[in-house]
Image (spheres, grey):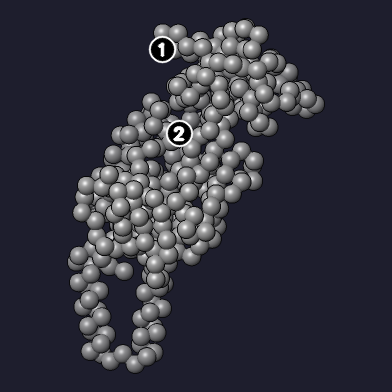
Amino acid sequence: MVTETLQNSYDVVVIGGGAAGLNGALMLARSRRSVLVVDAGQPRNAPAAGVHGLLGREGMAPGDLLARGRDEVRGYGGQVVAGTVESAARHDAGFVVTLADGSRVRARRLLVTTGLVDELPEVPGLRERWGREVVHCPYCHGYEVRDQAIGVLATGPMSVHQALMFAQLSDDVVYFVHESPAPTGEAAERLAALHIPVLAGTVTAAEVADDRLVGLRLADGTLVRRDAIAVATRMVARAGFLGDLGLRPVPHPSGFGEHLPVDELGRAEVPGVWAAGNVTDLTAQVGAAAAAGALAGAQLNADLIEERVREAVAARADGFSAADEARVAERVLGDRRHGLAG
């Protein structure tokens, strides 16, 4: 719930307070834009002990990284509030954003950085160990399960590739067919070449003892002991609140989830809306998400500059006097002093 006083309008409202959203907001705040970050507090990597593959912040707790980012945005005059966006709708030349507590703010532009939801197979016990012994990315968590007994729970065509990658980290990898088709042809040959056994049978549970995964139980009662499980999730963008704008997640070309499409600069199909991070790039790690947020923030600032120049040129062509121009200049300087430059 929002407890801070909100302004009536902002240059940019950033929806989502993860690495992408905060880095985008940082770029905008440093460009003297009025910016609001609305953070629902549901980061995808919350269960993880640390962030990995991020130079200079290797192993840092996800919560600590975001707390530092929030402080940095606020240090440049940006506003970061806890809350959930319920809807975003077109209003005049901009947008009106409605939060779950009924608060409403206007925005000239939107940056959507709400991330995604990992949908796991319906196997009892699996979700409870997510981010601990149940992992998905060899680059995010692979080193932490190195040399352990690893099981790869098949969920689709990418699971064979996943097994090959985890075989780089351990000599003890087992492939569980579960409810997927058994690998055939080249896929089966590649698994066999790396000595990865393929086990048929439906997995009925992830077994836990003393707060630790011990293995996967098959339908015939067999317990296959494993220290860690790798599973390719179905990744779905958090973007339902954009429906009033006509923006909806679409199937990702890879076939393993849904994302919000954007162009190479982060622009969505609706003018004035940008997106960055996992909401559009399902496989982006923290560093890539932050970089995409920075790019989107810079492009948003450039777009607002172009709008201002167009308006100024049009006003000059309409015959603004020197006195009119002086008044506009004074207004802009006054806006800057109050953090409202546009």
Residue 20, image x, y percentages? 41, 47
Left or right: where 65 falls relative to 161: left
Mark 1: which secondary structure? loop
* Number of numbered discs visible in the structure rendering: 2
Q: Amino acid at mark 2?
A: Gly
Q: Residues within 10 Å of mark 2 (few under 14, many from 20)?
A: some
Q: Is residue 125 above or below residue 243?
A: above
Q: Nearer the viewer, residue 317 or 275?
A: 275
Would you say residue 129 is visible in this rendering? yes
Left or right: where 157 falls relative to 4: right
Would you say residue 161 is visible in this rendering? no
Q: Residues within 10 Å of mark 1 (few under 14, many from 20)?
A: few
Q: Is residue 294 above or below residue 301?
A: above
Q: Which quarter of the image is occupied by the C terminus?
A: bottom left
Q: Dot 1 corresponds to which residue?
A: 211
Which residue occupies 24% across, 60% down? 7
Residue 76, image x, y percentages? 25, 54
Mark 2: which secondary structure? loop
Residue extending furthest toward the front: 102
Q: Which quarter of the image is occupied by the N terminus?
A: top left
Q: Amino acid at mark 1?
A: Asp
Quarter location, residue 299: bottom left
Q: Dot 2 corresponds to which residue?
A: 53
Which residue occupies 37% across, 50% down? 85
Left or right: where 293 falls relative to 250: left
Which residue occupies 40% across, 71% down? 93
Q: Earlier in the sequence, mark 2 or mark 1?
A: 2
